[in-house]
Amino acid sequence: MSTIIKETTKENWQQQSHPARLEERLPDGLVRCHLSPRNCVIKEGGRGFCKVRGNRGGRLVTLNYGKGVHLTEETIETEAVFHFSPGERILSLGNIGCMLNCGYCHNWKTSQARYVTDADVHYYTPEQIVETALRHGIRILSWTYNDPVVWHEFILDTARLAKRAGLINLYKSAFFISEEAVDELLPVIDIFSISIKSIDPDYYRKVTTGWVEPVLAATRKVYKAGKHVEVSTLMVTDISDDEQTARRISEWVKAELDVTVPLHFVRFHPDYKMSNSTRTPIPKLLSAREAAHDLGIQHVYLGNVNGVDGTDSRCVKCRNLLVTRYGLNARKIGLDEHGHCTQCGHDAHIKLPLPPLPLETVVPDEVSLEGVDLRRFEWHGDIVSLHVQALNTSPKEACIVHRRRFADGSTGPWVKVHLASGESYRFIMAKSREDEVGPEVGIPQSVESNLHEVFDRAHFPTQSIEEVGVSHSDITPILRYAGKQNMYDQLRKEGESA
């Protein structure tokens, strides 16, 4: 039976359920869910806080097993992971629902299940995920976007299958999760990229609707288990972009993890209930990075920025340039095969478990553009990433090609993306250097395709350019939350009066 991922007829995503793990059966037909620290007690026909775990017939079920947003090929830098196989392609996988409700969520349309429409949902099996990765030469599955915690059962089943196939599993999460759930993840997850929103308990409760203590405990647990861990903190303009925030998270990493654990300070873009804000000023990010360095954190990075000091990796001993980065692109230039500096031999704490695997590229003379629709996109402002979603309607394999265009009129090599018959696939293109003006994409006539502007690290869902046109804003995504957007103002006022 074919496991090609195809576009399917949309159905009511909430109708079908799957048995859930971490269940406690209680009297009177109640169940308690032990997946997150909320330990939701759910009555018959009800759901927990996440809105994707519920009680059916006195048993705990999950409503999102195998259901998520469209899988997407990206790079590992998308996930705030800089010290594991830099530049590696990943298959990003996101789902529906969340155990938090952060006021600035970039994935609010799918993280908050009440806003999910059937058109947002795609259906997968573990076998389809693994075979798609293998077919496209991808070696890392990334569980990401809204938050993987609420996709627990599907992740465990798929990650086990992936490991048997020689793949690596990456878990990008706010990590509001129970210790029992962490214990189940440890055998199958290799990399944890953890978003610690703040060390301040009051901030956590107001902004995320969760509490920080279990996040810190779970982060300590996976680090002590020997997993590769990187930590990121979103620096929200005028709320958490100060040096005190940077110092407190740095002190915690230093005391509870290690000074060699990479720490990322991430630039905020307005979204969800904070759409009336502005982007984090770059000087604030630079000050945060300096504060962390002053406290002894060795590897401090800035996220969601381009062409700014704080994205490259340098040797902490001799300052040799090890990895150069622009946006979501990385190039290893000063590392040996053991992840050590080629100049002085110092351990850079960068893991290189995978041998290089180059893209399939060809020169223009070897590419036939007959019957191909050429589309160009211009980078503008902070829109420096683009998703291409494509469906091959042909009974034969099809091939999309894309390349970079530069200000002097030159172009990069064509990169090929092969699509099996009937396959639906999505992949990212991201600006790679300052003088790059935009990508060019060649779409065969047998392929239905659309383009999606992406803000910073990828988010879901997006609206295609074909639906809404090219964005006239590089501050807030076009898909805007229709409810109250005054959380930012309220938090600022509280901060000013404190």
Image (cartoon, rainbow, N blue to C red):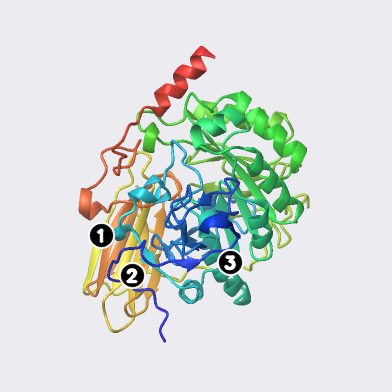
Q: Is residue 402 above or below residue 488?
A: below
Q: Residue at x 60, y 46 (%)?
A: 37
Which residue, as the protein is rendered here, is positioned at the far bottom?
Answer: 1
Q: Nearer the viewer, mark 3 or mark 1?
A: 3
Q: Which residue type does callout 2 highlight?
A: Ile
Instruction: Give the residue type at disc 3.
Output: Leu
Residue shown at the point (69%, 44%) measured from the top left: 217
Label 2 and label 3: CA atoms lie apart by 32 Å
Element at badge 1? strand
Eyeballing the image, is 496 above or below 362?
Answer: above
Residue 84 on image: x %, y %: 64, 56
Count neighbours of disc 2 (C-alpha within 10 A) and say few if under 14, some if 14 to 19, many if 20 or more.
many
In this rendered view, identify the residue nearer to me: 233 or 325: 233
- What residue sits right under mark 1 in the picture? 375
Q: Earlier in the sequence, mark 2 or mark 1?
A: 1
Upstream in sequence: badge 3 or badge 1: 3
